[in-house]
Image (cartoon, grey):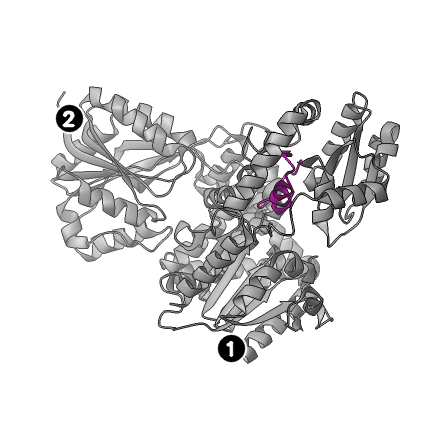
Amino acid sequence: MQNLPVTIVIPVRNEAPTLHELFSSLVALSPKPAEVIFVDTGSNDGSVESITRWMECAKSENIQCCLFRQPGAYPGAARNVGVKAASQPWIAFLDAGIVPQRDWLGMLWACSNKWNAIAVYGVCRFRSSDPFGQMVCAISYGMGAVAPVLPASLFHKEVFDCAGYFEEGLRSGEDIRWKRSLNAAGVSIKVCDEAVVDYAHFPPNLSSALMKWFVYEQSAAIARVGGLRRVFILFSIAMLYGLAVFGGKWGAILLVAYLLVRGVVDPFRRSVANRWWTYWWQPLAVIPIVAMLDLASIAGRSIAIFGMSRFRLASHSGGSQGRQGAGRLCFVVSSPMSAVAFLIPHIKALQENFEISLAANSQDTNLLRQYGVDLSVLHVPIERAVRPWRDLIALFSLYRLFRQQHFDIVHSLTPKAGLLTMCAAWLARVPVRVHWFTGQVWATKSGMGRGILKIADWLTAALATRVLVDSPSQRDFLLAEKVISERHAEVLADGSVCGVDGERFCPSREARRAVRGELGIPDDAVLILYLGRLNRDKGIGDLAVSFANLAMSWPNLWLLLVGPDEEGMQVQVRATCRECLDRVRFVGFTDKPEQFMAAADLFCLPSYREGFGSSVIEAAACGVPAVVSRIYGLTDAVLEGETGFLHPPGDVPAMISEIDRLIVNDGLRKSMGEAARKRVSQSFGQGRLTEALRDFYKKVLA
């Protein structure tokens, strides 16, 4: 059978799990298209490689295939690229995750000929086999329900001459806006109920669903989808929740009645089969899920209505264009110790070019002077813990500060400070707003808590004009999670916030002898060092178990834990290492980490989440190899097999094995330490990071 003169255009972004099913359905189409165009918008999960391999196989089916790369583009822009590049007179649209039936394209073609139509919509059938996906499907569309959709449709190219192309600045809703353009241009649209595609890839968990609802509602508002009717519906729902909280018994009764209709009656009514569930508990679980999705929708629409999303698009397109030269710069952190740890080298160097201020939760205005920085600290009451009333006070304090001082750049560090700072700076219309991501609290969480914290990071990035990330792998993670935009997020140099001061962090026999002598550790002992905050996310429990096992075989092995104990971890470590507790040492917070690193033979960081792992490269500068978790952030700090070893997070046997390799082989330990020191001097020098930050500021102010 001859291939139809049709080009299928498919936008793709991080869809590796769904591509195999799509590829199989494309090959099975009868009749087949003459051409398939994939437009990748920045995948980093192997999607591009999968497409490239399949394109070779498609040649045997006489299908011409093309792959275009448009990093950071939204679906509308991706479809426009495909339409303009198409060699055939007819265009069909699919999405990754959508699976066409064998006769889908043939049915569209037959309908277009039957009705002499240049615009024919196919229909999508919604289904899912995953329990959570079934609940989301039932809530959204109804299990087995069908509806006309753009990524199942066929158009002649002359349609685009009449109605124009898709809007490129919309994250979603561009299909509805374009359909309105078709109607406005007088294009007759037909619907072919026999041309069926299937969609089954609903969010697999609550956090993904919350983020999808939030982003869709925000994007739909920007695209003016739903209009006043949708605003009225969401406002009414918000009022119901408000009545339930403040209106006593009757408010609660009204909310329960609404949730029963929305969560029980609607899925029954919409689904093709009344029994849409697989397990008995699903109809009950739908009710709280509906409540949380409602709140996510209200938040997304509200943000868009108040202009934050529009401002994001506008500010990302240019920032503070037209500003010449240096200006006034304000760093914002919650704890002044964050400034001491990360910002002092930058502040010292940048004072030549900028008038710098530091806002932090400290009453000591002269705090930085003891570190050689002639700068007063501006007190802002930002606390690390979530306290709504105090957080509002901090937000107002920041807003007032920004309005009074007229800063050119506001730059935040740490999650809580970032959210409050970006909100206040946006309200105060600070022209350049920068946030530096240094790790995600929600990376190790699940459920609603993960969703809320993830939305907070997304909002921080949305309100910023530019985003910095302190490691390439963390940037990839945030892009995959759709928290940041590829066009407006970057990593300075090779990563890290401040790099390493090679004169301060270096091998020192004097420091080695002094620290070991003070702590009673023999000179010939093999010393494992952990330096950082002591909490569960850092894997302290795993390190204690590993040491307790290794200590039985190595009587000269010692463990040194340096840092503030945030979660009572010392008690757990003492209990785990009770048989070898005489070889375990604890030291609290220190402002001289270089001395302890010089005293160590091996650095361990078995963390479950990390932005970059500055302590790893600081230890490396002292000639100390590392054994760390294979997670984003740490994979940038350690070269596997060259400067240390990596193990899966939480895998204690693997950690024991990697540590043992370095204990037993002194030569390997020393050669890795030398390689680590050399790499740090070449890639993570403090001066290099400061120059990169200076260049970044010049760029955003240009």
* Numbered badge on residue 95: none
Magenta stretch in the rendered image: 604-628
Determine whether the residue tagged by mark 2 lies in a helix, strand or loop: loop
Q: Residue at x 86, y 39 (%)?
A: 520
Determine whether the residue tagged by mark 1 lies in a helix, strand or loop: loop
Q: Marks 2/1: CA distance?
A: 64 Å
As shown in the figure, which amino acid type bears the numbered disc 2? Asn
Q: Position of residue 557 (x, y in %)?
A: 78, 29
Q: Is residue 639 left or right of residue 177?
A: right
| Crowd class of label 2 (few under 14; some 14 to 19; many from 20; radius 10 Å) | some
Residue for badge 2 = 3
- Name of the residue lying farthest toward the bottom: 404
Image quarter in which the C terminus is found: bottom left
Residue for badge 1 = 406
Q: Residue at x 24, y 45 (%)?
A: 81
Q: Position of residue 188 (x, y in %)?
A: 17, 48
Q: Is residue 297 left or right of residue 256?
A: left
Instruction: Please say whether residue 165 is visible from this viewpoint.
Output: yes
Q: Position of residue 528 (x, y in %)?
A: 73, 34
Q: Residue at x 80, y 34 (%)?
A: 523
Image quadrant where residue 287 sits: top right
Q: Position of residue 424 (x, y in %)?
A: 55, 69
- What is the tally of numbered marks visible in this picture? 2
